[in-house]
Image (cartoon, rainbow, N blue to C red):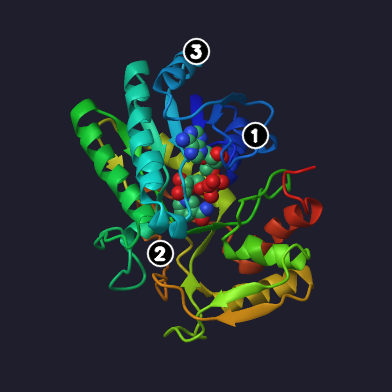
């Protein structure tokens, strides 16, 4: 299939490009390189530097490459920044997604997988999180993603778009063959941040909140391996139906506390990791983990990387060989 990966130079998008190329698809990658890295994009993918806001450019790429389906990973994705600069989030995540839908419509592209997030659930009333729980985001980032879920439902109904909006939990790890990795700047995700401490690039990591009502007082999250996650995207693509939306949690179904993550990074790297305990951050739910049963039952997908050390090991393999990330 001719598949366009938007945001394909970013962390998750570059893994999707790699998987799709390896599965024999013709892959086109679009990224404005605001956060992504050219070197992360598989050399067999056609690569275009373009911004989603430039509808004419996106239409031209879709037409030239005869695109049949889109995987849309491009977004602004820092929760804290979304609170201080909400217009950036609504512009990039909502308006630019509508521009992308305009381009898809103009070029006759009818299939889409869109990156949604567990942040759309906000502070869920119970654990694990099932897809039917109320979605009440607590920050503009989560709101922007939920708005797109609503927009996609309406466009599917009106125009027959076939789409999936998988809601990711915490995506972690790097390509199992070590070829590509994770290089966010700034890095706010706990595993890469700890690996940067292990590499001596950061002096320590702040541990926000040690008095939560959880097993050891620190926040608990569900870590899904990036390779499992992009494989789920292919499964979703194969199951799209015109006029319908698929909504699934993508998680492992098990929560690890921040202290358990720190211990795993110490075990895997064998390095000293300095932690500085700090007060809770506003808006961090104590515990978030998925009920991953719906996608398993209906589409047969479940995460294969369920061992935390193994997930951290795939990340460490890349980080230890690429201490400067994608900078040479
Ligand atoms: N990383 C996670 O744990 C996680 C969890 C839940 C949801 N998500 C979602 O998954 C998606 C990918 O996340 P990621 O961690 O790979 O982020 P990332 O920042 O590494 O990748 C996003 C890519 O999109 C590009 N981009 C942004 N705006 C663009 C625009 N207007 N036009 C063209 N390109 C643009 C960036 O340059 C970047 O390469 C995002 O939508 C994010 O909200 C990520």
Q: CA distance from mark 1 to mark 3?
A: 19 Å
Q: Nearer the viewer, residue 26 or 5?
A: 5
Query: Can residue 301 be seen from the camera position used here?
Result: no
Query: Can residue 153 be seen from the camera position used here?
Result: yes
Nearer the camera: disc 2 or disc 1: 1
Q: Which residue is mark 3?
A: 64
* Residue 14 screen position, x and y as percent: 60, 39
Q: Which residue is mark 2?
A: 290
Horizontal arrangement in the rendering, residue 237 relative to residue 41 (left or right): left
> In the figure, 204 relative to 152: above or below?
below
Q: Secondary structure at mark 1?
A: loop
Tell me which numbered mark, 2 or 1, is placed earlier along the sequence.
1
- Figure quadrant of residue 259: bottom right
* Residue 11 screen position, x and y as percent: 59, 46
Tell me which numbered mark, 1 or 3, is placed earlier along the sequence.
1
User: Residue shown at 45%/22% (left/top)?
Assistant: 58
* Residue 115 screen position, x and y as percent: 42, 45
């Amino acid at each position: 299939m001719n598949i366009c990966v938007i945001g394909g130079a970013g962390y998750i998008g570059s893994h999707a490009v790699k998987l799709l190329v390896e599965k024999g698809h013709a892959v086109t990658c679009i990224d404005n390189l605001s956060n992504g890295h050219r070197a992360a994009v598989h050399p067999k993918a056609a690569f275009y530097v373009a911004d989603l806001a430039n509808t004419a450019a996106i239409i031209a790429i879709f037409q030239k490459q005869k695109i049949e389906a889109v995987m849309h990973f491009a977004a602004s994705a820092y929760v804290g920044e979304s609170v201080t600069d909400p217009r950036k989030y609504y512009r990039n995540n909502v308006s630019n997604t509508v521009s992308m839908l305009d381009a898809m419509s103009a070029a006759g592209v009818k299939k889409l997988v869109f990156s949604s997030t567990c942040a759309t659930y906000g502070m869920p009333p119970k654990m694990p999180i099932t897809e039917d729980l109320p979605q009440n985001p607590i920050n503009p980032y989560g709101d922007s993603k939920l708005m797109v879920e609503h927009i996609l439902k309406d466009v599917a109904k009106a125009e027959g778009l076939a789409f999936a909006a998988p809601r990711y939990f915490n995506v972690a790890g790097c390509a199992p063959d070590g070829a590509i990795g994770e290089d966010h700047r700034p890095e706010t995700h706990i595993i890469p941040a700890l690996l940067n401490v292990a590499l001596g690039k950061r002096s320590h990591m702040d541990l926000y909140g040690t008095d939560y009502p959880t097993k050891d007082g620190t926040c608990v999250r569900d870590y899904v391996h990036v390779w499992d996650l992009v494989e789920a995207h292919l499964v979703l693509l194969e199951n799209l139906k015109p006029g319908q939306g698929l909504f699934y949690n993508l998680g492992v179904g098990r929560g690890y506390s921040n202290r358990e993550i720190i211990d795993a990074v110490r075990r895997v790297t064998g390095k000293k990791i300095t932690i500085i305990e700090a007060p809770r951050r506003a808006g961090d739910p104590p515990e978030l983990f998925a009920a991953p049963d719906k996608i398993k039952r209906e589409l047969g997908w479940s995460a294969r990387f369920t061992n935390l050390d193994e997930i951290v090991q795939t990340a460490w393999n890349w980080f230890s060989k690429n201490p400067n990330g994608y900078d040479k």
